[in-house]
Image (tube, rainbow, N blue to C red):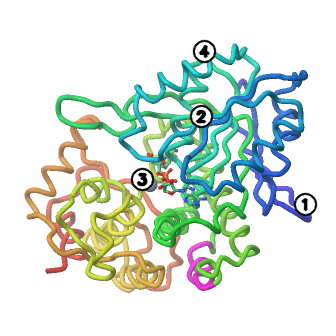
Amino acid sequence: MTAPESRDHNVVTVAPQNPSASAYDVRIGTGILANLGPDVCAVVKRCRRNQPAFLIVDDTLPDEIISTATLSLEAAGFAVTSADITASEKNKTLESATRLLQQLASTRAERTDPVIALGGGMVGDLGGFVAATYKRGVPIIQCPTTLLAMVDASVGGKTAVNLKTETGLKKNIVGSFWQPALVLADIAALSSLPVRTLRSGLAECLKHGLLCATFDIENDLFGWLCAQLRAVFDQNRTAMQELVTRNVRVKATVVRTDPHELDPAGGRALLNLGHTFGHAIEPLVDISPTVNPDDAPVQHGEAVALGVVAAAYTSVALGTMHADHAEAIRVAFAKAKLPTRVNGLPSDDALLETMAHDKKMSGGTLRLIVLDAPNATDELGRCCVVNDPPREAVVAGFDAIRGA
Ligand SMILES: NC(=O)c1ccc[n+]([C@@H]2O[C@H](COP(=O)([O-])OP(=O)(O)OC[C@H]3O[C@@H](n4cnc5c(N)ncnc54)[C@H](O)[C@@H]3O)[C@@H](O)[C@H]2O)c1
Ligand SMILES: [Zn+2]
């Protein structure tokens, strides 16, 4: 992976280790959506007049973002067909994919004609799935418009839809790996993002800061993030561009080392730091954060924040991390105005049961990502995998985030 930089925007090139997989650029800068058309031409390589381009759009985006993207594609000679979708997990389904595939087929798109996903991770995952399956795969250009989608969902080629089953909606269990041809992260799009959605993205950034040194990359990210929180909440464009760039470098490095999450020692699975706890917390509708109690039920990033704090205290109980670090992690998440405790958390047994459900799905062993900084003087940024941790250690994690 290389990261050349130009005056206007940064470029992180994601180069998979597998030589048969193509490298792609992640462009990060303010106003870069205005160049979407020429950038798409450059990656689809066969740009003819009136070539179809299928633009899947989050329908809550400001008109300005949508028209910038559309006009740029049209000016580059694309015949643009737009399809709106409301960003919601309920809409990230095979039914939505079918509707989009039908619309795409009606444009008579060929194998080389691009699909462009303009929106957050929901639109990116669904658009990626549509592109991966139409005619066995057409180019997908990801244009993420949330912080989470810029630093996480748009990079790495995971595409997915949720599946309605007899026992409820199963998230992301239908999908495939389909690498984007290009990712354009326009920092200007973040200015309309609700602050709560911004905070949820920040939770994933802080998580990156706690695992990046394992891959020997962006080693000071966690400390840098803590120092930049004010600038990020003020939407300082320079700080936002650096925030996204540094986090994309982390995600790009991790997925490059283990593109299909097969490394038993960790690899891409380390990105799940906080997520095993988080997944047990996210579906709970009766819990409320002790700070910002109106933020209930918790969103994904908020559940990840709670999950990382829980994982930190589990790490202390296991002896892999010094207690001072766990407190510093709690303080950092609290400074980002993310929840670190919740009221109404179910019993230990009920939470363990939910985590055991995840465990069955992953082959019978509870696999936790824990932090690795046993001494007070160790730098934060390393983590590792622990299989079947003792109950008391997991419960120490629950206790750390349990409010009233
Ligand atoms: N593929 C991956 O590797 C990967 C990784 C992490 C998450 N995901 C997926 O990503 C999804 C979550 O992504 P998300 O947090 O971006 O959620 P999202 O796409 O649902 O967007 C969150 C909210 O922000 C709104 N929004 C988006 N951009 C906006 C903008 N610029 N201005 C104003 N509002 C805007 C959306 O309409 C929505 O209401 C989940 O479906 C998750 O499974 C995928
Ligand atoms: Zn996540």
**Crowding near the residue tagged with mark 1, few <14, some 14–19, many ≥20 C-alpha atoms within 10 Å:** few
Residue beneath the point at 21% across and 50% down: 355
Distance from disc 4 to disc 3, alpha carbons, whole Å, reads: 29 Å
Q: Which mark is residue 83?
A: 2
N-term mark: 4 or 3? 4
Residue 172's x, y, as percent?
40, 37
N-term mark: 1 or 2? 1
Given the image, on which type of amino acid does mark 1 rest? Ser
Name above or below for residue 84 compared with residue 329. above
Name above or below for residue 8 compared with residue 388. below
Q: Which residues are magenta?
A: 221-230
Distance from disc 3 to disc 2, alpha carbons, whole Å, reads: 32 Å
**Crowding near the residue tagged with mark 4, few <14, some 14–19, many ≥20 C-alpha atoms within 10 Å:** few
Left of 232 or right of it: where is 283? left
> 239 and 246: which one is in front?
239
Residue designated by label 4:
136
What SS does tag 1 mark?
loop
Closer to us: mark 2 or mark 4? 2
N-term mark: 4 or 1? 1
Circles 3 and 2, Cβ within 8 Å, touching? The answer is no
